[in-house]
Amino acid sequence: MNLAIGQLTLGSVPRVVAAISDSDISKLDVETVERVDVLELRIDMFENQSPDYVEKVFNSTKIRFDKPIIATLRTSDEGGFSKLDDNQKYELFERVMSLSDAIDVEVNSEELLKRIVSLCKADNKLVIGSYHNLDNTPGLEDLTNIVARTKQCGADIVKIAVKANTRSDVSKLASFTEQSKGIGLITISLGPIGQISRVFNPIIGSLMTYGHLGSPSVIGQLSALDIVEYLRIFDAEYNEDLINRLHLLEFA
């Protein structure tokens, strides 16, 4: 499966996503953002979620940083703050479509996901169908069913972020990631025990990994810059790609 977000290919090396809100943008400098691959704009964390304001933030972010952008509206049930209904979400996603490279929609909002798939296909944008479980890590059969259900809705990528209560939970999701390599998967074990998954899982097959550049958006989330440094140590291909991409001798 050949996937790309913007001009950035997925699957060859891990890609680091920085999750940010509108309040983070003014505090970030271009040099810092250059070290990550993708920006996730968490609309549910914006101080104002009116279409005009959201479009303005996306436009200024695109111009200032020139990075692929994932548009996300996370509901409170899955660790976010959005209280908008599906029609309001659709309106916002439609408004920022031209300024985004991918849209993240929760698979539990199945009808919205299908509508966004149709919208994105017409504009050649990626759709990430996401599943979050803040209580536990489902069994392998359930994980397989989540992937199948999300793919049936037409999503290009399946993102699974689930709470790890034990080290066995982390191992379970890692094994599932490795076995499912090539189908377009992002996996994260949430919580302090799961922090290692943000570095290890992308090395064994998870397309992207998420960190913060401001305040963590979820417990256990690492700094995106720390993830970059860990990947440089443990993944030689990632380190080489980073050096070539940034053209900076200091990274060699």
Image (cartoon, helix red, strand yellow):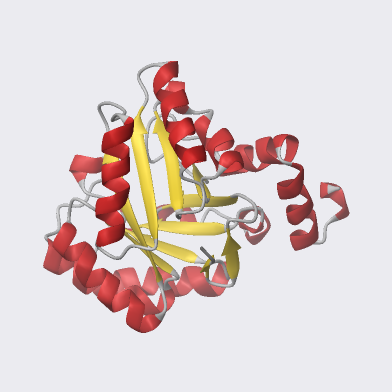
Residue 208, horizontal then vertical, whole percent: 52, 50
What residue is rendered at 28% in x and 70% in y? 117
What residue is rendered at 32% in x and 49% in y? 147
User: Could one spot residue 251 in this view of the protein?
Assistant: yes
Q: Nearer the viewer, residue 187 or 76?
A: 187
Determine whether 85 is above or below 225 in the image. below
Residue 108, horizontal then vertical, whole percent: 18, 50
What residue is rendered at 42% in x and 27% in y? 172
Determine whether 17 is above or below 155 in the image. above
Determine whether 79 is above or below 37 in the image. above
Residue 130, horizontal then vertical, whole percent: 31, 50
Q: Relative to 74, is 174 on the left or the right? A: right
User: Could one spot residue 73 in this view of the protein?
Assistant: no
Number of marks present in the image shown? 0
Residue 244, horizontal then vertical, whole percent: 79, 60
Q: Quadrant of residue 217?
A: top left
